[in-house]
Amino acid sequence: MAKRDMYRVLFPREHQILARFGEDLLLAVKRRGLTKQMICDRTGFDNKTINKVFAGDPGVAIGTYLKVMAVLGMEENFAELAAHDEVGIKLQNIKLLRGSK
């Protein structure tokens, strides 16, 4: 496998999550009564790129996903993704509890 293709290597669960994310974005578009062409016009991306976003293609830049979310008024959802770090909080709590003995 060529070195530049390594970014496309995801575990099956990661593929499922990304595919679901793309589907959720497409559903958000449809709920708002928008078309793919309207998304293309508002983001400046071509139809091929927008189709990749809705397919959850791992080769699409994260900024492209963010731009689509912004058109849908969902950019704040993106900002909150890493803020909910349950594992990190649990690890920190364990460390704090051990240090207080």
Image (cartoon, rainbow, N blue to C red):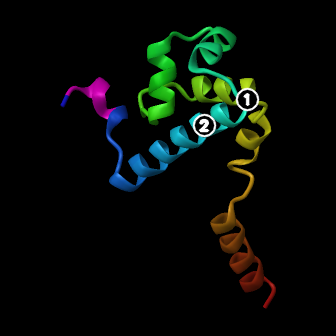
Which residue shows up at 34% across the image and 34% down it? 8
The N terminus, quarter of image: top left
Q: Residue furthest bottom?
A: 101
Position above or below: 41 against 57: above
Task: Inspect the image, locate mark 1, and give the three-letter code of the amino acid beneath it.
Answer: Leu
Q: CA distance from mark 2 to mark 1?
A: 9 Å
Task: Inspect the image, locate mark 2, and give the three-letter code of the amino acid beneath it.
Answer: Leu
Which residue shows up at 79% across the image and 31% down it? 73
Q: Is residue 49 left or right of residue 4?
A: right
Main SS of the magenta part reads helix
Q: Position of residue 82 (x, y in %)?
A: 68, 49
Tell me the element at label 2: helix
Please tell me the numbered disc located at residue 25.
2
Please tell me the numbered disc located at residue 72.
1
Magenta segment: 2-6
Tell me if mark 1 has few (under 14), some (14-19) or many (20+) residues whose alpha carbon lies within 10 angstroms of its own.
some
Observer-nearest of 96 and 90: 90
Check contact, mark 2 vs mark 1: CB within 8 A.
yes
Which residue shows up at 34% across the image and 51% down it? 11
Position above or below: 10 against 66: below
Q: Is residue 45 left or right of residue 57?
A: right
The C terminus, quarter of image: bottom right
Observer-nearest of 53 and 11: 53
Position above or below: 25 against 81: above
Which residue shows up at 72% across the image and 85% down it? 98
Tell me the element at label 1: loop
Label 2 vs 1, first from the N-terminus:
2
Q: Is residue 40 left or right of residue 58?
A: right
Q: Would you say residue 4 sits in the magenta stretch?
A: yes
Q: Position of residue 10 (x, y in %)?
A: 35, 45
Rendering quarter of residue 70: top right
Q: Residue furthest left?
A: 1
